[in-house]
Structure formats: structure tokens, C-alpha cells
Image (cartoon, grey):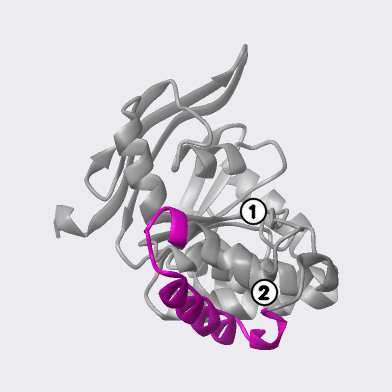
Amino acid sequence: MAKNKADIIISCTDVNKWFDDFHALKGINMEIKRGEVIVIFGPSGSGKSTFIRTLNRLEEHQKGTIIIDGVELGHDVRNIEKIRMETGMVFQQFNLFPHLTVLQNITMAPKWVRKWSSEKAEKVAMELLERVGIPEQAYKFPGQLSGGQQQRVAIARALAMQPTIMLFDEPTSALDPEMIKEVLDVMIQLAKSGMTMIVVTHEMGFARAVADRMFFFDEGQIVESGSPTDIFKRPKQDRTKLFLSQILQH
């Protein structure tokens, strides 16, 4: 059955990226449908974070085509701005402004970029803090929060811009083990709400629970892709089998 092209929200064709002589991404092809949850996994240095950062032009690709929701990501600054307004991003480090309260961190971009009134921005921010389970932290500063709470604020801040796509770059890797679950629980709820999500992670339990498809990256290439059942139960490539055997022992 032919895919309905209107359903494709992200289309990557032959995407290549070099850092000087280092070929970081080697011909990445990927199509993602609206509402899909995609998990990208693989060893360190395999190009996962570089790839996800090309999707909102934090890294520039030198060859190939990236189209996000019908807009091609090239050198046109207006297109880059348009895409960044539609894609929320959550990083390993929380990147919160330490001198602003939680509420101020969340309301800043909607007020500046979306031109919302303070009243509207604060109402939405409080709803989002409720959604991520920490409304009581609104008037605290990031330094007064645990790592897990800070990452949930970072998720709320990304959602405040009302993006159509959420990108997560190893959002739990900087957290203590007991804080990982609280962040993953928020991400699972988000996935179930129908948000298009691309998640770079080693959290295989999360992948099993919510991923529609998984992509295994190694040395700048997609080695294998498939449903969680395909990847965990019947991986085809020896490289995938080896990586999973190492990661699933922990």
C-alpha cells in the first residue's frame, strides 16, 4: 500500500554531514509520519545526536534534503525560523536560565516569539507544569530543583511553544537512576497523546513501551530499522544483535 505523502511530516533523503574530514552522517534516509514515535539508538559517536540536531538546523547538513512539514531545511533563514517554531527540543543538559524562575523560563519564548500576553503565557505554563507533575515548583529557581524536575521543566518549556514535533536528545543520560523514571513517564504520556516524537535514547524499556519504529545507528549510518518487536525479537544484522546483547545485560 502506498504511503499517503500528506502523512509524512519529516522526510530525509541522502543526508550527509562532515566535521572537517570526519564523515558523521553517511546518506541517511528516513520518512516519519505525523504522530509517530521514533527511537534512535546506537553506540556513542554513531551520529544519533548529530542527526537529530540537523532536523532543526542546530547542525547543518552538507548534502541531501530534509523536509519538515512541507518546508525544506536549507539556507533560507525564514524556513529555519519556521521549522524551529514547530519543533521543540529537549537536550541532555537542561539549559534552563538559572536566574529566572521556572515560570519565567517557560513563558519567555511564547511571549517573545509567539507574542503572547503575560496572562496567556502564564496560564499555559501552569497547565504544562500540571501536566509534567510539578505545578508547585513554578516560583522556584532551577538550582532549587532536582535533575529530574529540571528536565520536566525543560519539557514543559519546549511544549509551551506548541510544537508539532518534539525532539529528545538523550534526555535522561545526565540524570541519577532514580530520576529517570519520572522523566520517562512524562514522555510516555506525551507519546500517547499523539505527538510526533523523535527520541535518541538508551532507554530500551521506553522504546518497547511507546516506539512505533526504531532505528539503529552505527558509524553514521542506519544499520537496521523496524518495530520494537522486530528489533528486540528478530534483529537481522549482527551489529544490532551485538549492541542489544551488551545494552540489555545492564
Q: Quadrant of residue 195?
A: bottom left
Q: Please name the residue shown 62% across and 81% down the image.
A: 185
What residue is at 54 percent from the left and 82 percent from the top?
A: 126
Side of 248 relative to 144 (left or right): left
Relative depth, front residue between 245 and 16: 16
Q: Amino acid at mark 2?
A: Val
Whether residue 234 can be seen here:
no
Q: Is residue 113 magenta?
A: yes
Reading the image, the residue beneath label 2 is 183
Distance between mark 1 and mark 2 Cα atoms: 12 Å
Give x and y (percent) for residue 46: 64, 37
Of callouts 1 and 2, the N-terminal one: 1
Pick the front one: 53 or 121:
121
Quick check: marks 1 and 2 in contact, CB under 8 Å? no
Q: What amino acid is at disc 1?
A: Phe
Crowd band around label 2 with a 10 angstrom C-alpha radius: few (<14), some (14–19), many (20+) = many
Image quadrant of residue 227? bottom left
Q: Please identify the quadrant where the C terminus is shown.
A: bottom right
Splitting the image into 4 quarters, where does residue 92 fall?
A: bottom right
| Horizontal and vertical percent position of residue 108 | 54, 60
Count of picture labels: 2
For label 1, the crowd category at 10 Å Cα-Cα, with few meaning under 14, some 14 to 19 and many 20 or more, is some
What secondary structure predominates along the stretch shown in magenta? Answer: helix
Residue range in magenta is 111-138
Residue beneath label 1, please? 91
Label 2: which secondary element: helix
Q: Position of residue 136 (x, y in %)?
A: 69, 88
Which residue occupies 41% across, 80% down? 193
| Quarter of the figure with the N terminus | bottom left
**As rendered, which of 247 and 96 lies closer to the eye?**
96
